[in-house]
Image (cartoon, grey):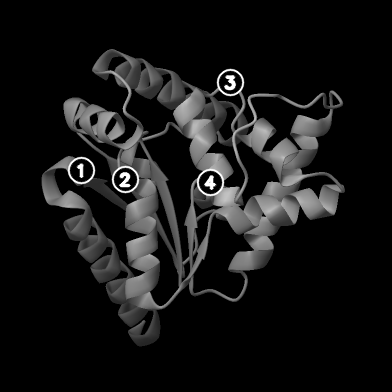
Amino acid sequence: MIVTISREYGAAGLAVADGVAHALGYELLTDDLLKTVAARLGTSPDAVSAIASADLPLPERLLAGLELGTAESGVMPVLPNDFDDSVRVEIERTIRERSAAGNIVILGRNAGAVLGRRPDLVRVYLCGEREWRARRLVEAFGQSRESALADMDRIDAARRKISKERYKLAMGDARGYDLTIDVSRFGIDGAIALVVAAVEHAEHAAVSG
């Protein structure tokens, strides 16, 4: 089975994805994806991360840097005009190749839209009450509530734009996912349990059907 997880900013996407992968014994694809793309393009993971996280504020870029094992430099590399498209193509290719064997959890990158509807795919969307997400960001990064709210609006707007322009998908629209979870209501552990239950049900249906 393949699990793709999309999320609102601050909705504990990484924690839920990691928990689901651990519970199911699946591979978790986050930072490795960008490392593979960088190797294929003959560039650095920092350059790919800069494009994949372009125009995002410091906390989001810090997370990308931590996943890659690099420090936030604050310097954006100079890249050719077609580099953005090259990164997108290679990210999509990597998602398809790494998911071919199944038993994988993929966080972000519109992986559900890239892979399309298929019986071995469970597409998850994580959301959360606005103030709950803001509190998580304040606790994680020590930023002000106002800064956290502004980051949430900006990042979610950027994600909605990419989803719509590249994949004709309205981010958060239930028709584009198999399971939508309000993490602020069920908590991280509850969200993990719901995803695991959905995957196990899908596995049983695939075998019996």
- CA separation in Å, label 4 and label 1: 26 Å
Whether the residues at callouts 2 and 3 have beta carbons within 8 Å, the answer is no
What kind of residue is marked 2?
Answer: Ala
Disc 3 secondary structure class: loop
Q: Which mark is residue 55?
A: 3
Q: Residue at x 23, y 36 (%)?
A: 128
Q: Which residue is mark 2?
A: 12
Q: Residue at x 68, y 65 (%)?
A: 97
Instruction: Judge by depth and name the residue closer to the eye, 122 or 151.
Output: 151
Category of crowding for the residue at label 4, using alpha-carbon neighbours closer than 10 angstroms: few (below 14), some (14–19), many (at least 20): few
Separation (CA) of disc 1 from disc 2:
11 Å
| Cα–Cα span, label 1 and label 3 | 27 Å
**Pointer 4 residue:** 66
Which badge, 3 or 4, comes first in the chain's sequence?
3
Residue named by callout 1: 182
Which of label 2 and label 4 is nearer to you?
4
Say few, some or many: other residues with alpha carbon within 10 Å of mark 2 (under 14 / 14 to 19 / 20 or more). Answer: many
